[in-house]
Image (tube, rainbow, N blue to C red):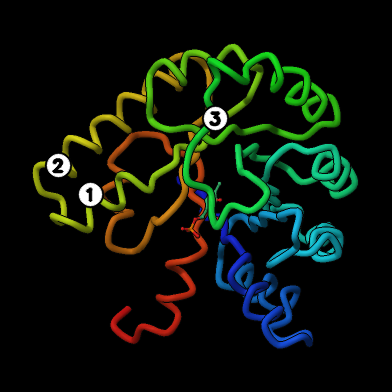
Amino acid sequence: MTALSVNLNKLALLRNSRGHNSPDLLHYAQRFIELGVQGITIHPRPDERHIKQQDAHELAHLLKDFPQIEFNIEGYPSEAFLLLVEACMPAQCTLVPDAEDQLTSDHGWDFTKHLETLRPIIQRLKNAGIRVAVFLDPELKQVELAAKSGADRIELYTEEFAREFSKDFSGKNADQVLSKYNEAAILAQKLGLGVNAGHDLNLQNLPSFLSIPAILEVSIGHALMIECIDRRH
Ligand code: PXP
């Protein structure tokens, strides 16, 4: 079964826009758990525009009471980020090549450039007992190199799939793009990597994406918040 990890960034953004603790992230993390999700994801950024360092610590503390829930912290592996992750001890850390001022993640790692930098970082997190995923575009070359990085999993960046899917709703291009993701996932699995996926996944495109076998986890934030206020679902 594919695990759903809910990304809480958007709730934190809403809270920060008012300067007091509403919506309360801890309350809604528990609410998502009651609703049956398998994981909670956060993406702390250096400017703390949504998730703050304190949120990460508080969620880590809360999730100790829910050992079945996978805590996933994603972000760019600066020293400050790595120290936060080591202090919070999530089940999984997803490394993302974000610039500091980036609006949202919009590309995967280029392992032709970053393999040697990432290898010791991945090892450091694994030594601490944290599973490591690396954010990746669906490119076979990148998958091959990711397998040499020591990462346990890749997270496929699904924006391109979601864009094609919404354009022609599972038409020709969406099928072509989906088969690119399928090939990347199958190669990753052959090379011993687990496969997660995320970005712009929603209720419409998810069933099609999950025709790819053995996707272990999807992390979803943006669409989930929209779907909460869309009465058609
Ligand atoms: N995966 C990564 C690495 C992300 O940065 C994000 C957005 O924070 C997501 C998944 C979730 O994307 P969305 O909010 O579009 O569901």
Which residue sits at x=33%, y=64%? 203
Is label 3 within 8 A of ligand 1 (CB to nearest ligand atom)?
no
Tell me: residue 45, above or below residue 129. Answer: below
Which residue sits at x=32%, y=78%? 233
Task: Quote the CA–CA distance across marks 2 and 1.
Answer: 6 Å
Which comes before the other along the chain, label 1 or label 3? Answer: 3
Badge 1: residue crowd in 10 Å (few <14, some 14–19, many ≥20): many
Q: Circle 2 sits on which residue?
A: 173
**What's under tag 1, amino acid-wise?**
Glu
Q: Which residue is at the far front?
A: 101
**What's under tag 2, amino acid-wise?**
Asn
Which residue sits at x=43%, y=33%? 137
Which residue sits at x=90%, y=46%? 87
Q: Circle 3 sits on which residue?
A: 109
Task: Quote the CA–CA distance across marks 2 and 3.
Answer: 24 Å
- Does the residue at mark 2 contact the one at mark 1 (Cβ under 8 Å)? yes
Quarter holding the N terminus is top left
Badge 2: residue crowd in 10 Å (few <14, some 14–19, many ≥20): some
Task: Quote the CA–CA distance across marks 1 and 3.
Answer: 22 Å
| Residue 123 position in % (x across, y down) | 77, 21
Which comes before the other along the chain, label 2 or label 1? Answer: 1
Badge 3: residue crowd in 10 Å (few <14, some 14–19, many ≥20): some
Q: Circle 1 sits on which residue?
A: 164
Which comes before the other along the chain, label 2 or label 3? Answer: 3
**What's under tag 3, amino acid-wise?**
Trp
Q: Identify the secondary structure beneath mark 3.
A: loop
Name the foreground residue: 4 vs 168. 168
Q: Is residue 194 left or right of residue 64?
A: left
Q: Identify the secondary structure beneath mark 1.
A: helix
